[in-house]
Image (cartoon, grey):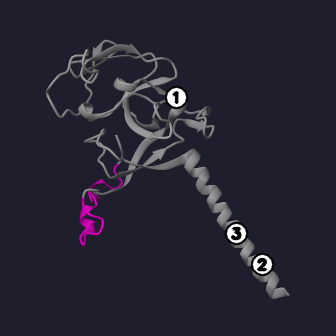
Amino acid sequence: MESVKRKKSVVREYVEAIGIAILLALFIRTFVVQAFKIPSGSMLPTLLIGDHLLVNKFIYGIRVPFSGKVLVPLKDPKSGDIIVFKFPKDRSIDYIKRVVGVPGDEIELKNKKLFVNGKPTSDPHAHYTTTAILPGSVSPKDNFGPVTVPQGKYFVMGDNRDNSSDSRFWGFVETNDVLGKAMIIYWSWDIDKPLLSIDRFSSVRWDRLADIIR
């Protein structure tokens, strides 16, 4: 009888330990940090396809799960931050872009040049793949605005300016849709190299591991 009780006790301890580990993992993923994978080239050359990131979900405050409403505000996203957010056109999809306009900012693009509040910016992260310029009547890619960012919203753009679906095309990001700030690359590999390759490790971008995202 004692042996049976001891076995039940051991099983219970394992079940409790696993349950606590699951709850802890869910808590961390919901409120503290979450992994994110780069699936497209919209943030080139800052972020490459195949980069795996850790996103700090705590930095902008404690939020209500699912609704995104901020319970305990800590700080707001600022221009230059790379944020992960729910895509406004399909909130089941997560997007990653750089904030270029915060509430109250006036945003305008003139022949690919970014103006904030009427002044040209240095825009050091902007990357262009073509010198061709489209008029605003054809596309908002190179000539856009001016628009003023409403309260509670952000204007975001991909660093790969000629190949990015961003606020120029679908509008602002709601505060409640911001999931967190991209912080560090914890893994990266070239997904174009075959998974079953004998030399699979050659696809790992060792120089990008542990890179702080800026």
Magenta: main secondary structure = loop
**Side of 11 relative to 119 (left or right):** right
Please identify the quarter of the rendering in which residue 126 is found.
Answer: top left
Tag 1: amino acid = Thr
**Side of 100 relative to 152 (left or right):** left
From which residue to which does the magenta span run? 193-211
Rendered position, 14 above or below 40: below
Tag 2: Cα neighbours inside 10 Å, few (<14), some, or many (≥20)?
A: few
Tag 2: amino acid = Lys
Which quadrant does the N terminus fall into?
bottom right
Rendered position, 43 above or below 104: below
Mark 3 or mark 1: whose residue is earlier in sequence: 3
Mark 3 or mark 2: whose residue is earlier in sequence: 2
Mark 2 or mark 1: whose residue is earlier in sequence: 2
Q: What percent of the width, then of the height, locates residue 213?
A: 35, 44
User: Disc 3, disc 1: CB below 8 Å?
Assistant: no
Disc assigned to residue 8: 2
Alpha carbons under labels 2 and 1: distance apart = 49 Å
User: Disc 3, disc 2: CB below 8 Å?
Assistant: no
Per the image, the residue denoted by label 1 is 175
Residue at 70% x, 69% y is 15
Residue at 80% x, 84% y is 4
Q: Is residue 108 magenta?
A: no
Q: Secondary structure at mark 2?
A: helix
